[in-house]
Image (cartoon, rainbow, N blue to C red):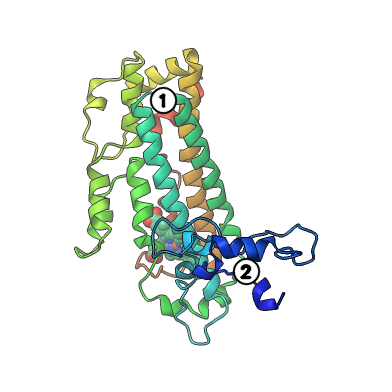
Amino acid sequence: MTDEERTPNASGGAESGSESGEGAGGGEGSGTGDGTGSEPERPYGAGTQAQEGPPGSYLTYASYLKIDELLSLQQPLSDGPEHDEMLFIVIHQVYELWFKEVLHEVDYAVKLIRTDDLARAHHTMKRILTILKVLVAQLDILETMTPVEFLTFRERLEEASGFQSHQFRELEFVLGAKSQWAISRYPEHEPALKRLRQRYEEPTLWDAFLLCLTREGYPVPRELLERDVTQRIEPSPELQEVLVNVYRRDPALSELCERLVDLDEGLQEWRYRHVKMVERTIGTKPGSGGSAGAEYLRKTLFKPAFPDLWGIRARL
Ligand code: HEM
């Protein structure tokens, strides 16, 4: 067998089709490289006919995951380019992918709570929390970049900033931290504005939870069930009475409350770690997004999404 014959067909071309798959994979010693049989028998792409695409095209790892497109999206702007800009781009892109997944899961959790499927809602919340831990831990990687290394390309960012991350704002909105100001900062032509406005108008995860409490027979104050969902979630002493009872009497529901606290705490933890990373990287300099930098970010700390769940701790 020649090297050419032995090389797996990573592009999934027609010549690696099933008939030739038999020939290429089934021959003596073929597809195993060292002859131990520990390597795949089939050339890449010699599997099933792709559901989309022309006849003879086969689904591969690269075609399914759009690897070529994905790997073409890291485009540094600095001359050289500067070594650390790649890390900066990759880490932001990875964050945005995780934000996408978190939003996907939070939407699912809302749906499950609305249908009183509390076991699966709990399971989904645990997945979200595990992702949040990864989001916090990833800041360690960025902290390996020194202030001087950041300065090698910082000016190329112009006014671009995580400030403008619409997925982060969507996440804030679905957790109840609504803000007209955040929406007003996007230009009208911004494609994400429609989704952001929709999230602004929609009830939050907390609203779904309050309705669930009502269906479980708890006397949630009517004004909270009919609240203006475009407003931030404000603490309510009446609701706190209800929640104390939930914690005392209802293990399943109180577990769900704990997962909401985890989520709230996880996001606060990310904010805190982000501020510390910002402080050590740019100190007291203003942010590229036009804010006062760390001074602005410090004002976003320790503001819980679900204040009532924090307000009852001393009474439990
Ligand atoms: C060297 C790295 C980084 C620096 C120096 C930095 C700096 C800043 C600064 C100064 C702000 C305030 C807004 C402004 O004026 O720009 C900000 C906001 C923000 N950054 Fe970063 N950041 C960094 C990395 C990241 C990463 C990796 C993410 C992940 C997506 C991120 C997400 C955000 C978000 C979501 C906000 C808005 C926070 C809010 O308004 O509450 N940042 N950043």
**Residue at x-position 32% and y-position 17%:** 215
Pointer 2 or 1: first along the chain? 2
For this orientation, the residue located farthest to the left is 188
Query: Does the rendering let one see residue 152?
Result: yes
**Residue at x-position 44% and y-position 31%:** 121
The x and y percentages for residue 177 are: 33, 44
The x and y percentages for residue 35 are: 79, 63
Is residue 303 toward the left or the right of residue 146 in the image?
A: left
Q: Amino acid at mark 1?
A: Asp
Is residue 141 toward the left or the right of residue 163 in the image?
A: right
Which is nearer the eye, 237 or 62? 62
Query: Does the rendering let one see residue 292?
Result: no
Asked if ligand 1 lies within 8 A of label 1, the reply is no
Residue 49 versus residue 126 in the image, above or below = below
Q: What label sits on residue 117 in the rendered view?
A: 1
Residue 200 versus residue 146 in the image, above or below = above
**Residue at x-position 49% and y-position 32%:** 259
Measure how far apart labels 2 and 1 are at the Cα level. 46 Å
Residue tagged 2:
8
